[in-house]
Image (cartoon, grey):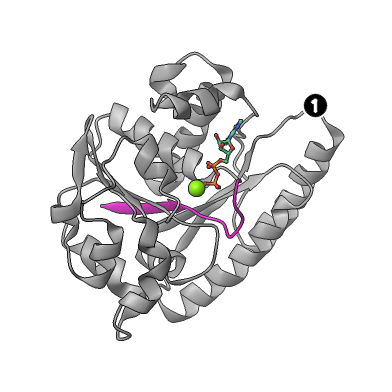
Amino acid sequence: MITLAAASQKGGVAKTTTNLAIGAKLTQDGARVLYIDLDPQMNLSTTLKAATAGVASSLEVLTGEATIAGAAQLIDGYAVVPASRLNGKADDLMSSVGKDYRLRKALSAVADDYDFAILDTPPALGTLTVNALTASDWVVIPAQADAYSLDGVTDLAATIEAIREYTNPDLKIAGILLTRYNPRTSISRIIHEDAEAMAAELDTKVFRAWIREATVIKEAQAVKQPLFEYAPSAKVAYDYRFFIEELMEGVNG
Ligand SMILES: Nc1ncnc2c1ncn2[C@@H]1O[C@H](COP(=O)(O)OP(=O)(O)O)[C@@H](O)[C@H]1O
Ligand SMILES: [Mg+2]
């Protein structure tokens, strides 16, 4: 099993959208995909049509009250462990020993059952994001192509450095993904250059693929359909397919 997370300490940069697309494409290609939603906002869970009331969630997985096998819901060919609104309290609810490793340990029990685990995190550094990065083989850094969003990359870079030092020396950065990008604007070009400079510093790359701003993204999420089913021939669907192929080239070596 390969564990991936599109993560950033900034909100609204298309973390969840990117995680959804990765899982949808891999499922379509026949892989066994497990999504785990850690974000108390539960965007990934609701878009994937997971039940969130009266069910075991990633919170119980973290506290040890549930296993991933017990909490996973099977929907449309993928499995999903939903988040709970109370995930923000995870830190207080977990006993302190081995806190950062809870998700990693839980995932190791299902390593033979899935080809990919995809982790969706909240836009903050805390136990949830530390658990996700400690459990991940690869992290994708989405950056919205606007003036402030590269700040999120700098913050995440410091976190990744700490994670590698203390909890997961093998964590690899797959690359920086420019999202909601409009190549025609001058700001986008500047951001692309800044992203290249940051990637060099992080010893990673900016993906050749970038994701354009497109309303079908929001529409597909509103009707709870994977982008590739809702609008298979939309340009942004091609953007995401191109990105996921590039990502998989790196992941599969
Ligand atoms: N390429 C895009 N074009 C237009 N809207 C987008 C695009 N990517 C994401 N969005 C929208 O932007 C908002 C934030 O995206 P989301 O994936 O939820 O970000 P995050 O998980 O980082 O907070 C959502 O409403 C989503 O539908
Ligand atoms: Mg999100």
Seen in the picture, residue 16 relative to 155 is either above or below; the reply is above
Quarter of the rendering containing residue 207: top right
Say if the magenta span includes residue 3: yes
Q: Which residues are magenta?
A: 1-12
Q: Nearer the viewer, residue 247 or 120?
A: 120
Looking at the image, residue 5 lies above or below residue 239: below
The residue closer to the viewer here, 157 or 72, is 72
Specify the quadrant of the image occupied by residue 150. bottom right
Q: Residue at x 20, y 43 (%)?
A: 73
Residue identified by numbered label 1: 184
Is the residue marked 1 within 8 Å of ligand 1, measured from its CB? no
Residue at (44% x, 69% y) in the render: 130
Q: Is residue 19 left or right of residue 239?
A: left
Tell me where residue 68 appears, x and y as whole percent.
19, 57
114 to the left or right of 40: left
Secondary structure at badge 1 equals: loop
Residue 116 in percent (x, y) is at 29, 47
Q: Is residue 200 visible?
A: no
Is 239 or 70 nearer to us in this picture? 70
For residue 178, say whether it is visible: yes
- Residue nearest the viewer, comparing 97 with 29: 97
The residue positioned 56% from the left and 42% from the top of the image is: 14
Badge count: 1
Q: Is 170 drawn above or below residue 23 in the view shown?
A: below
Instruction: Spot the residue most to the right.
Output: 186
